[in-house]
Image (cartoon, grey):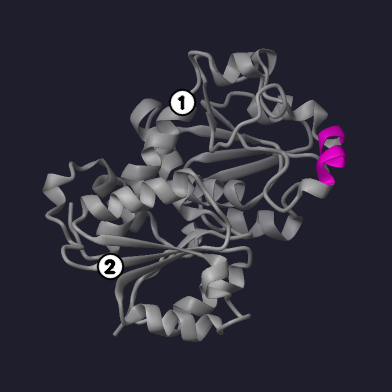
Amino acid sequence: MTVTHLLNIADLGVGQINEILALSAQSVESLNAPLQGQGVALLFEKPSNRTRHSMEIAVVQLGGHPVYTMGEEVGLDVRESVEDVTKILCGYHAIVAARVFKHSFVERMAKVSTKPVINMLSDYSHPLQAFADALTMTQHVGALGDLTVAWVGDYNNVARSLTEIVLISGGRMQLGCPLGYNASPLEIERLKALGGSIEQFDNAQEAVAKAHVVHTDTWISMGQEEESSKRRKIFANFCVTEDLMSAASKGAKFMHCMPAHRDEEVSAGVFDGAASLAIEQGHNRLHSARGVMAYLKGAKQ
């Protein structure tokens, strides 16, 4: 039996992406509770506000029962191997979802799982965030294939998944990252093969030129606290300010996956301003999570 997982956006085709986005936009009632009477394992090595709340409520809306488990309760590869944990959870649940430090953990889960595995975040990618981003852009800006999307800051897991979903959908991606924190030449070649078009710059101004949407993320992610001073100096010219937004297309929107640090990676005026879609983007974590799980359970739009 072939089991469909969601580990990376790049594993999907444009048809699958569009199907999930369509399901994400549907009403709860129209999805007919595909998780009725079933459990969903939510394993969190890394804590999260949006991911926990969105996934738990989405499971309930689909008729299922979410079971939240902290990483230390399981001890992946400490108390038990990733494989043993996964095999046991498959006996209880319809879906196994994990938010992990190492991407290899979700890959190992998928290899032995008899149920769909969802990557709720790893050090390599964040596909659930990418679907929330894509849903928000299609609702408020336009079809992804028609957009020029800018990323300003660290080329991290969030940037990778966002770039993949834009390119597979036929859009244009413009990365603005400091040297040493940018996508490698090999990574750029991999991304180019996905479709659309992509260009990378080492300054924010060039990256946002003609962009319909400007994205950023915190400069200091969980686990990088010891690099705080160093990163603040390196990223000092990559703050998304009102002046930077004025260099984008007229009426450009701002997006941020949150948590946000005002007047660090984004000015308070931009984050809280009329161009910001960050709160709607956060709310769409719920709707896109529901769409992903409905799709993995075979729901049709």
Query: Which SS class for mark 2?
Result: strand
Instruction: Please report the residue visible at 48 percent of the width from the left and 86 percent of the height from the top.
Output: 84
Query: Which SS class for mark 1?
Result: loop
Residue 237 x/y as whole percent: 80, 27
Kind of residue sitting beneath label 1? Leu
- Give the extent of the magenta segment: 227-233
The N terminus lies in quadrant: bottom left
Please state if 250 lies on the left or on the right of 298 as rendered: right
Residue situated in front as seen by the camera: 50 or 207:
50
Instruction: Please report the residue visible at 37 percent of the width from the left and 34 percent of the height from the top.
Output: 138
Q: Which residue is mark 2?
A: 39
Instruction: Please report the residue visible at 55 percent of the width from the left and 66 percent of the height from the top.
Output: 71
Question: Crowding at label 2, few (<14), some or many (≥20) Cα neighbours within 10 Å?
Answer: many
Kind of residue sitting beneath label 2? Gly
Residue 161 x/y as whole percent: 54, 51
Residue situated in front as seen by the camera: 156 or 188:
156
Residue 110 x/y as whole percent: 45, 77
Alpha carbon separation for disc pair 2 and 1: 32 Å
Residue 277's disc number? 1
